[in-house]
Image: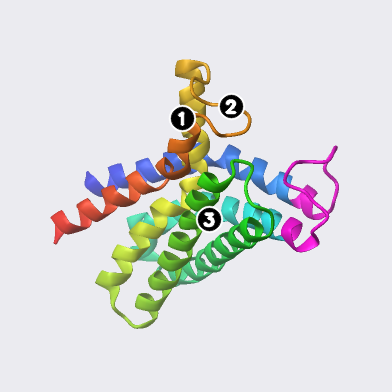
Amino acid sequence: MRPFLQTSSLVLLVLLTLPFAFYATDFAQRGLRDALPEPHYLQSDIAVANVSVFVHMAAGAAITALVPFQLIPAIRRRWPALHRRSGRLIIVAGVATAVGGLIYIALRGTIGGTPMDIGFSLYGVLLLGTALQTIRHARAGRFVDHNAWALRFFWLALGSWFYRVHYGLWYLATDGLWSNPQFTGGFDLVQNFAFFLPYLIGVEIYLRRRR
C-alpha cells in the first residue's frame, strides 16, 4: 500500500506541475528567441543576463516536471539505468537553473530589491549544492547519502512551483493582502524564503527521525 500511495502522490504532483512547466518553457523559448509580444521587465540590454534568466526558466521547468519521477519506487527498481540517466539529466538542468538565476541576480538584481536578492540567491546556492552532492554521492556508491541529498534536491527543485502556488492560494484567500507589484509587502518579504526553507527544514526533521 505504501509504494502505491507514494507513486500515486508523485504522479498527481507531476500533473499539477505540468501547466507551470509548459508555461515556463514556452515563455523561456520565446525570450531566448527575442519573440516575446512586448518588452518584459526581465529583459534588459545585458545579453548575458537575458540568456541567463531564460535558461534558468527553461531548466527550472524541466526539473520541476521531471524530478518526481526519480522518486517513484517502480522506476528505480525495474529500470535502474533509466533512473541513472534521467538523474544525470536532471542534475545538469538543476545546475543550469541555479547558475542561470545567480548570474541574473548578480547582473541585474530582482524586482523585489535586496530582500528578494538575498532570498533567491540563497535558494540558488542551496539548489546548486544539493544537486552536486546528490550526483557526488551517487558516483561514489554512497547510496544512503545519495538518497538523503536527492530528497533535499527534490523539494528545492519544486521551489519555483511552490512560490506560485503560495501566491495563488494567498490571493485566493486574502485578495492580495500585504502584497504589491513591487514585491515589498509583508507577505512578499516572507515569500522570499517561505517557498523553500520550510520544506527544507521539514526534510531535515524527517531524515533525522528516520535515522
Q: Point out residue 207 in the picture as x, y percentages from the top left corner.
A: 21, 57
Q: Report crowding for label 2: few under 14, some 14 to 19, many 20 or more residues within 10 A (C-alpha).
A: few
The residue labelled by disc 1 is 186
Horizontal side of residue 107 vs 121, given as left or right: right
The amino acid type, in three-letter code, at marker 1 is Gly
The amino acid type, in three-letter code, at marker 3 is Ile
The amino acid type, in three-letter code, at marker 2 is Asn
Horizontal side of residue 193 vs 143, given as left or right: right
Specify the label residue 63 is tagged with: 3
Which residue is at a point 49% across and 39% down the rendered structure image? 163
Q: Point out residue 192 in the picture as x, y percentages from the top left corner.
A: 47, 42
Q: Earlier in the sequence, mark 3 or mark 1?
A: 3
Q: Looking at the rendering, which quadrant does residue 142 occupy? A: bottom left
Mark-to-mark CA distance, 3 and 1: 29 Å
> Residue placed farthest to the front in the image?
114
Q: Report crowding for label 1: few under 14, some 14 to 19, many 20 or more residues within 10 A (C-alpha).
A: few
The residue labelled by disc 2 is 180
Q: Point out residue 123 in the picture as x, y percentages from the top left corner.
A: 47, 54
Name the mark nearer the viewer: 3 or 1: 1
Q: Earlier in the sequence, mark 1 or mark 2?
A: 2
Give the vertical position of 93 relative to 197 (above or below): below
Stretch of the chain drawn in magenta: 29-51
SS class, disc 1 = helix
Q: Earlier in the sequence, mark 2 or mark 3?
A: 3
Q: Quadrant of the N terminus?
A: top left
User: What sort of colour scheme is used for the picture?
Assistant: rainbow
Mark-to-mark CA distance, 1 and 2: 9 Å
